[in-house]
Amino acid sequence: MLTWRTFCIGVSANLVLATLLAFGLDAADHAFPPPLEKAREVSTEVVDADGQLLRAFATTEGRWRLGTKTKDVDPQFVRMLIAYEDQRFMDHRGVDPLALGRAAFQLVTHGRIVSGASTLSMQVARLIEPREGRSLTAKFQQVVRALQIERRLSKSQILDLYLTRAPYGGNLEGVRAASLSYFGKEPRRLSVSEAALLVALPQLPEKRRPDRNAGGATNARERVLKRMAVEKIVGEGEAERAGLIPVSSRRLQLPALAAHLAEAAAKKEPQVKRHQTTLRRKVQEGLETVARDAAVKLGPKLSVAMVMADARTGEIVGEVGSADYFNASRSGWIDMTRINRSPGSTLKPFIYGLAFEDGLVSQETMIEDRPTDFFGYRPRNFDMSYQGDVSVRQALQLSLNVPAVRLLDVVGPTRLMVRFRRADVRPVLPANEAPGLAIGLGGVGTTLKDLVQLYAALANQGRPVQLGDGIREKPAVIEGEPLLEPVAAWHIADILSGVMPPLGAGQRGIAYKTGTSYGYRDAWSVGFDGAYVLGVWVGRPDNGAVPGITGFASAAPILFEGFAKSGIAITPLARAPAGAARVAQAELPISQRRFSMTPSGLLASSTREPAPQIIYPPEGARVDLGAKQGGHINPLILKLQGGRAPFRWLANGKPLPDMSRRRVNQWTPDGGGYSTLTVVDSMGRAATVRVFID
């Protein structure tokens, strides 16, 4: 007879056993957890500034598995997936007892499997830990894993794993890889037809692949659509219309844009799975298309590199390291945006900029283009001809060599190199050589990125900006003195905006300069509008000569096409700052009507008077004229000694109203900040100081 004591002992024993079993199961659960960390392995992605995919790298198993979250997918697709695969997904704990009972009953009554009982959690378990065959043991292990997964992850996290790991045929895994490959778009806005196909594919991905079995894919999609109509996820009419749309039988390649930048990002931080760049996908696609098409026209072994940057922020918005990364004949794996090459004539604008700053020339100043010997250095023009007397504007637009070297001889090669450092650009000189006159014609090495950085200052009214690397290195405005004064930068931009467009190209409202290195090894073109700078290089990566390539004929057409295909609207060039204006030749002071310096920097006609020298204000002085108070600004007294009268004073490149024979003058500035004061005597000799007005 069962006594109360016996009953209590039995209950206690059962409780102990239940407790031990619970502890045992919990211990087993912790001892043999599901491989969730491995399950989260995804392809490395490189995306643009807006998060759009530029390039993906396959996983170690060779899978295209793009990390996907529920928020990345069309909500309609998610509703269709749950309705089709696991209606009680949000309610069960990994296993659906009702589905299991239904499947078991159908197996008994029909003698075969009629419907499955796998929940989305069980499918995730199978995806992260695949097992051969469909035995009861495998199913039991799947059930256990599903329960473990439910203990560790939220429903949203489980759904994210399914969206990332579901098979879609071949080496495609996850809904994003499938959507990009089959439809060419992200899965955020799927049509009903597309969503139904993506719901149907994972059950039999190889038999239903639309690129290999369009009929099987269509039938599977039809079953999903009918089920969705019955479940009222979509309307019957909508389901019918979706079923009439042909299934696409193509499989697209995943994006492979910005190959060099993507490789650099992946190598720099291999543990990071998503690298965001400053590039813009539309710009990048346009530039790569232009570079690829241009290289085909140019001929074998030639490559094209391009860099486009925002001159205001320094962000690189497009970068093409070569015409075709995968083309071995063009050495496509070499990133030519970072290789030092001779820049040809592309540095000339900065020589002219210094001459404008010093008041040595104006746009209509006449300058000689004739054979000249600069102490053994005899520059010749590209076409071996000479133009005689030309204006400074014409000399720069025609890229004449002798006038540029005349000006460089006066402003000084070392001073030019120092100005480049203000923009954090350091051209490479030949070994053991000091800066010489040859640097004005390309006798240094520089990269395409550095050229774009220099020209960004011209687009930015003389203020230099540090370009980013497109990945992690942040761009920044460079503090300190400008590369060129705003007035000088405006004059250069104004001249370059008048350069004739290349053959077949319309005027686009950009300023640009071309260059060709010695021996026809490099062709360059760099242009800018009021906001963006684009640089182009053409040549052979092995530094071989390419007879016939020139900056104007080979690189300039690519520049204009690049601006057109970038999708960026042209921004007008900066307006003229105070004191900047084109002055007709007849209205120039006598000293500025002709640049008459000899190669040594002396006056062409001899004179006993010493050159003029500004003795007040001294170089670098800080003068308080009341500008800080924002009211009336007092005039600044100007004093000089030496030189031959009459004298012409210039403030920030703009001539003061009257010439004077006196050695004392005055000038009232427009406002505070740095100003450049220049005096030119009747013999054309000049002196310059820079002061800061408070």
Image (cartoon, grey):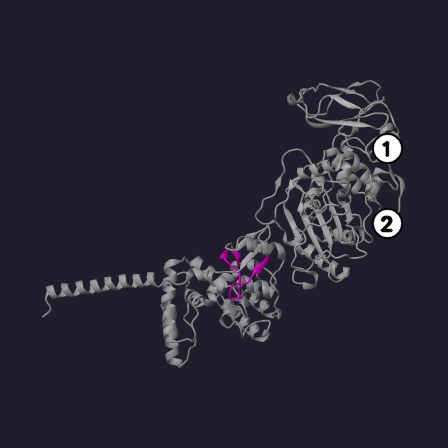
> From which residue to which does the magenta span run?
52-73
Give percent across and percent down for residue 517: 77, 50
Quadrant the C terminus occupies = top right
Amino acid carrying label 1: it is Ser
Give percent across and percent down for residue 208: 54, 73
Q: In the drawing, does residue 210 fall left or right of residue 132?
A: right
Give 626 or 384, whichever is nearer the viewer: 384
Dot 1 falls on a residue whose secondary structure is: loop
Q: Residue at x 67, y 46 (%)?
A: 309
Query: Badge 1: how crowded within 10 Å, few (<14), some, or many (20+)?
Result: many
Q: In the drawing, does residue 338 fall left or right of residue 36?
A: right
Q: Is residue 440 above or below residue 563?
A: above
Dot 2 falls on a residue whose secondary structure is: loop
Amino acid carrying label 2: it is Asp
Query: Would residue 432 be seen by someone viewing this image from the given angle?
Result: yes
Give percent across and percent down for residue 30: 33, 60
Task: Farthest residue to the right: give it.
Answer: 388
Q: Earlier in the sequence, mark 2 or mark 1?
A: 2
